[in-house]
């Protein structure tokens, strides 16, 4: 049991808990509230409840099953590395961290094999060094912290949007504008907990900037820059515009198109301030073969 006393007033409980409990994310705090694991002044706390000065907040963390992370000799393409940071070019199909169904074939298992003694521990045993994540079927760049200092600084950059992430995608249909900004809050889907959706009621701020790279018959090649980092953000936002990502059968068309069994979404560039020197670091990963093959098909279609 974790017992806290509020010294602030009018702050949502999930925000308060995420700030007060080390290592607890806001989404994890929301799950604890939904599960009835948080009490305020002796009574079960409600999800949207806010703090008052002097409130006693009690949190019952879930019992975690001990899980040993097995190092696995899975090839990694390391495109940048120094004493504090490494950047991985993740292939599509590789899960980032262990979870049900993927306990020993993830990026974390590979990191433990290649750099197991040189990773930050802030995110716990299941996510050593992981500062942010990308979807299993998204390819591209992912930054990993090799010590807690680097992790803290990079996480701060992620939070204040100074860690710039740029993606390329192929979307279905023709975008009307050559450039634009999608400013629409994203939250958990009300009936399908595995999906996200644009929702003004329970969504969090989400902003995606996009620009057209090339236009093809029935499709558009776009570049997207994240201002925020919500789960599935680019996929949800582009689908919200009516232009889902080619191959995304979760948020787009249910049948594969042009032979694409997964979404054409690639995290192609990362720019951050080095956590120790403060100097800017730019890392770029070229489009992978599956993405180039899709573009070649579109070019042949005219």
Image: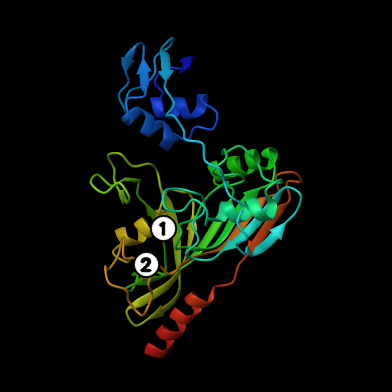
Q: Nearer the viewer, residue 79 or 160?
A: 79
Q: Is residue 302 visible?
A: no
Q: Nearer the viewer, residue 258 or 103?
A: 103
Mark 2 packing: few (<14 Cα in 10 Å), some, or many (20+)? many
The secondary element bearing badge 1 is classed as helix
Q: Judge by depth and name the residue closer to the eye, 73 or 154.
A: 73
The count of marks equals 2
- Relative vertical location of residue 118 with respect to residue 16 in this rendering, above or below: below
Disc 2 secondary structure class: loop
Residue 32 at x, y percent in the picture: 38, 29
Residue that protrudes farthest toward the left in the picture: 191
Q: CA distance from mark 1 to mark 2?
A: 9 Å
Residue 151 bears which disc, if any? none
Q: Are the two marked residues, 1 and 2, in contact with CB atoms closer than 8 angstroms?
A: yes
Q: Which residue is mark 2?
A: 245
The quarter holding residue 234 reads bottom left
56 vs 123, left or right, is: left
Q: Is residue 210 above or below residue 274?
A: below
Residue at (36%, 11%) from the top-left corner? 41
Residue 158: x and y in percent read 56, 45
Q: Residues within 10 Å of mark 1 (few under 14, many from 20)?
A: many
Q: Residue at x 47, y 64 (%)?
A: 93
Residue 210 appears in the figure? yes
Where residue 137 sits in the image (x, y, percent)? 44, 63
Q: Position of residue 86 (x, y in %)?
A: 68, 54
Q: Is 185 left or right of 135, judged from the image as shown?
A: left
Image quarter (top left, top right, bottom left or bottom right) of the C terminus: bottom left
Identify the coloring.
rainbow
Identify the residue position indicated by label 1 in the image.
Answer: 234
In terms of image quadrants, where is residue 11? top left
Left or right for 276, reference 202 = right
Q: Earlier in the sequence, mark 1 or mark 2?
A: 1
């Amino acid at each position: 049991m974790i017992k806290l006393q509020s010294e602030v007033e009018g702050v949502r409980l999930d925000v308060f808990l995420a700030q007060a409990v080390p290592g607890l994310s806001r989404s994890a705090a929301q799950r604890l509230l939904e599960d009835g694991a948080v009490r305020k002044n002796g009574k079960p706390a409600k999800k949207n409840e806010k703090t008052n000065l002097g409130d006693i907040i009690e949190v019952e963390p879930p019992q975690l099953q001990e899980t040993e992370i097995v190092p696995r000799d899975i090839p990694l393409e390391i495109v940048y590395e120094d004493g504090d940071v490494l950047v991985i070019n993740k292939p599509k199909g590789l899960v980032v961290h262990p979870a049900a169904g993927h306990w020993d074939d993830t990026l974390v298992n590979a990191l433990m094999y290649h750099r197991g003694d040189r990773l930050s521990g802030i995110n716990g045993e299941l996510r050593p060094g992981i500062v942010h994540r990308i979807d299993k079927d998204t390819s591209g760049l992912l930054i990993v912290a090799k010590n807690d200092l680097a992790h803290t600084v990079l996480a701060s950059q992620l939070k204040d949007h100074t860690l710039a992430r740029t993606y390329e995608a192929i979307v279905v249909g023709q975008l009307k504008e050559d450039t634009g900004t999608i400013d629409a809050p994203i939250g958990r889907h009300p009936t399908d907990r595995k999906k996200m959706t644009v929702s003004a009621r329970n969504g969090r701020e989400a902003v995606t900037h996009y620009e057209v790279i090339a236009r093809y018959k029935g499709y558009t090649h776009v570049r997207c820059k994240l201002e925020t980092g919500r789960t599935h953000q680019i996929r949800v936002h582009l689908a919200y515009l009516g232009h889902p990502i080619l191959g995304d059968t979760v948020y787009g068309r249910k049948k594969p198109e042009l032979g694409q069994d997964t979404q054409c979404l690639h995290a192609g560039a990362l720019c951050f301030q080095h956590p120790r020197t403060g100097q800017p670091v730019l890392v770029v990963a070229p489009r992978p073969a599956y993405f180039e093959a899709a573009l070649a098909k579109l070019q042949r279609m005219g």
